Amino acid sequence: MKKMNVKEIIKEMKENNNYMYFKGEWYPDLAMYFAENDSGYICDIISNVADNNVDIYTAGLLEWIGQNNNFYYIEDAINEFGAPEKFDILQAIRMGQYLCYERAIYNNLYWCIKLAILENIQAEEISEDILERIEEIANEEDNNAQLEDYIEEIDNAIEEEEEEDVK
């Protein structure tokens, strides 16, 4: 059975033009941060990645707000989360940036899940059947699933496949 190199699959995936595109912007770093996780509920990972990538510096926040008409996210964030108790424009921008990043990840959840599984499985090579199963899992986009369950399923499938090859 022909095997494919996992690192080559990841490299090809990152070079794909559709990788982490959302509302006129590219967000490949968010997927990489997502893939650094090997456990946890997917929805929690999404929240953590979005939160951890919000700019802490005023200059970064002001630069972000001027890009690509991002004012929209501030309004949406205030409508979704409510206005800060003591209104602070920088906090409102942070809320908007968080919402933007969260939506970017959800919009590209297929890529994030696929990348996280590939980055965290034990094998250096996989079969086409295993890659198809990873893509099926990623297509389900179940944000209430635990990432480690998917990784374990793929590791077990690889192990079973290797045992079959030995026989």
Image: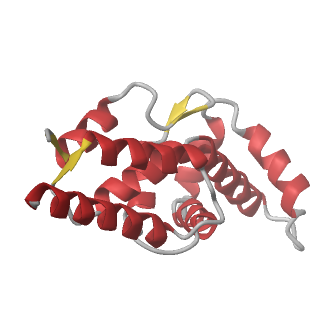
Q: Residue 13 or 49: which is nearer the viewer?
A: 13
Q: Please, which colouring scheme is shown?
A: secondary structure
Relative to 76, 103 lies left or right = left
Please tell me which residue is depicted at 45% across the width and 64% down the height of the picture: 150
Relative to 141, 120 lies left or right = left
User: Residue 143: x, y in percent?
Assistant: 63, 59
Vertical side of 155 occupied by 133: above or below:
above
Please tell me which residue is depicted at 59% across the width and 48% down the height of the picture: 140
The quadrant where residue 66 appears = top right
Please tell me which residue is depicted at 54% across the width and 32% down the height of the picture: 25
Quadrant for the C terminus in the image: bottom left
Relative to 160, 167 lies left or right = left
Q: Is residue 29 visible?
A: no
Q: Looking at the image, which residue sits at the far left? A: 166
Vertical side of 153 occupied by 104: above or below:
above
Q: How many marks?
A: 0
Quadrant for the N terminus in the image: top left
Please tell me which residue is depicted at 18% across the width and 40% down the height of the picture: 8
Relative to 34, 127 lies left or right = left
Q: Residue 35 or 131: which is nearer the viewer?
A: 131
User: Residue 86: x, y in percent?
Assistant: 87, 72
User: Residue 109: x, y in percent?
Assistant: 56, 47
Q: Looking at the image, which residue sits at the far front? A: 167
The quadrant where residue 16 appears = top left
User: Residue 129: x, y in percent?
Assistant: 32, 43
Q: Is residue 155 visible?
A: yes
Vertical side of 148 occupied by 49: above or below:
above
